[in-house]
């Protein structure tokens, strides 16, 4: 039965981490520059040069994150009415995991769209 619980939470967590990558790659630098903290951004890039790699391939980062978030939403949608076990303890855990998975999915969407805005929409508006 533990495999079912692990499957319920794994894909939303993967989509959360991938959408967090979009936030780090694009929204964080834009926020720091807009706040006038360009020196802080230079320090962050010096300490974490991987940010340049993420920013360079942001289309791929966003594409992968979008596919994972879409897949996660699809699986959550399919399993929304799936039966929980009859054991009261397992049924309670099943219900809690559904709520947690839904919250993680919504958080992933929010982070993804914030990153999407700062990566692709805000530069067009400011130009």
Image (tube, rainbow, N blue to C red):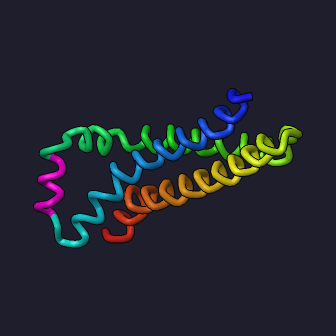
In magenta stretch: residue 36: no
Magenta highlight range: 38-45
Percent of width and height locating residue 61: 43, 40
Residue at 15%, 63% in the rendered image = 38
Percent of width and height locating residue 101: 64, 48
Percent of width and height locating residue 90: 77, 40
Is 32 placed left or right of 10 in the picture? left
Q: Quadrant of the C terminus?
A: bottom left
Residue at 38%, 70% in the rendered image = 125
Is 115 placed left or right of 15 in the picture? left
Q: Nearer the viewer, residue 15 or 120?
A: 15
Tell how many labels. 0
Quadrant of the image occupied by residue 103: bottom right
Is 79 placed left or right of 122 in the picture? right
Q: Quadrant of the N terminus?
A: top right
Q: Nearer the viewer, residue 99 or 53?
A: 99
Percent of width and height locating residue 4: 72, 31
In the image, is residue 117 above or below residue 82? below
In the image, is residue 94 above or below residue 3? below
Q: Nearer the viewer, residue 92 or 73?
A: 92
In magenta stretch: residue 40: yes
Residue at 35%, 39% in the rendered image = 57
Main SS of the magenta part reads: helix
């Amino acid at each position: 039965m533990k495999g079912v619980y692990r499957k319920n939470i794994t894909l939303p967590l993967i989509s959360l981490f991938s959408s967090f990558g979009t936030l780090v790659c694009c929204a964080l630098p834009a926020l720091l520059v807009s706040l006038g903290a360009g020196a802080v951004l230079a320090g962050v890039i010096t300490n974490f040069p991987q940010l340049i790699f993420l920013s360079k391939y942001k289309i791929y980062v966003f594409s992968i994150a979008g596919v994972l978030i879409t897949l996660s939403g699809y699986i959550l949608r399919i399993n929304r009415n799936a039966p929980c076990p009859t054991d009261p303890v397992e049924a309670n855990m099943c219900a809690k995991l559904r709520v947690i998975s839904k919250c993680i999915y919504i958080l992933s969407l929010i982070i993804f769209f914030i990153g999407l805005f700062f990566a692709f929409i805000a530069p067009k508006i400011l130009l």
